[in-house]
Amino acid sequence: MKKSIKPNTLAMPTPVWCVGSYDKDDKPNVMTIAWGGICCSVPPMITVSLRKATYTYGSIMERGAYTVSIPSAEYVTEADFFGIATGKNSDKFAVTGLTPVRSDVVDAPYVEEFPLVFECKVVETFELGLHTQFVGEILGIKADESVLNEKGMPVMDKVNPFVFTPATREYVGMGKTVGQGFKVGKKFMK
């Protein structure tokens, strides 16, 4: 039997993505978010939702660009710090010892040590209550060669991302493959 729960942000899992931007003084900043996802295939687009109170919000509004760096599980501590500290009062890259890299595609930095990066230009914003959703067209992708398969595509096990569960506020590693998309469900096709 199912129990009713008060409406909340309990969907799981949510991504752990580190959003890079430059502030008005050209200082690189990065913020960890959980509210985001792919929102369009053609052209490819990613959304991230931020509160106006965040330092990153103002930077993205001003520059019209952001990056999404996907950390591997070995960087869970740094990614958590990126989400709980503010770039207004701290240089998150200096504190963690990670390396900001200026994108050659958009006006935003990314995290060198993270294996997969999406470079996005803001094409739309939506006010959604407490959050603003930024829709960014993916203009570039950078991936460490070590996480690519023989076809040049990123492999989940090699990227080793982790997810966030809002209900328990835990970071969880990814498990084994449970099926091949667009294939395992074909057993129900007639």
Image: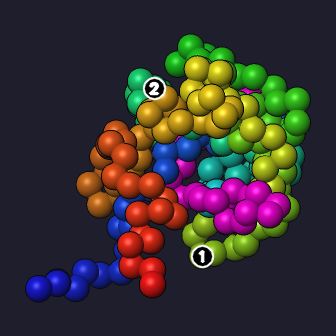
Q: Residue 48: x percent and y percent?
A: 64, 57
Q: Amino acid at mark 1?
A: Gly
Q: Nearer the viewer, residue 24 or 41?
A: 41
Image position of 117 with respect to 181: above or below: above
Image position of 63 with respect to 9: above or below: above
Q: Nearer the viewer, residue 33 or 190?
A: 190
From the viewer's perspective, is the residue at label 1 or at label 2 nearer? 2
Our reading of the magenta stretch's main secondary structure is strand
Q: Residue 98: x percent and y percent?
A: 59, 18
Image position of 35 with respect to 116: above or below: below
Residue in the picture at 82% in, 61% down:
43
Residue in the picture at 41% in, 30% down:
73
Instruction: Provide the residue span drawn in magenta.
Output: 27-47
Q: Earlier in the sequence, mark 1 or mark 2?
A: 2
The answer to which quarter of the image holds residue 167 is bottom left
Figure quadrant of the N terminus: bottom left
Q: Nearer the viewer, residue 174 or 49?
A: 174
Figure quadrant of the C terminus: bottom left
Tell whether 7 sits left or right of 107.
Answer: left
Farthest residue in the front direction? 190
Residue at the spot of label 1: 129
Mark carried by residue 75: 2
Tell whether 109 sits left or right of 121.
Answer: left
Tell whether 111 sits left or right of 12.
Answer: right
Tell me if I can see residue 87 in this picture.
no
Q: Amino acid at mark 2?
A: Tyr
Q: Nearer the viewer, residue 149 or 63?
A: 149
Reply yes or no: does residue 40 show up in magenta.
yes
Pointer 1: residues within 10 angstroms few (<14), some, or many (20+)?
few
Residue in the picture at 59% in, 59% down:
37
Q: Residue 61: x percent and y percent?
A: 81, 54
The answer to which quarter of the image holds residue 77 is top left
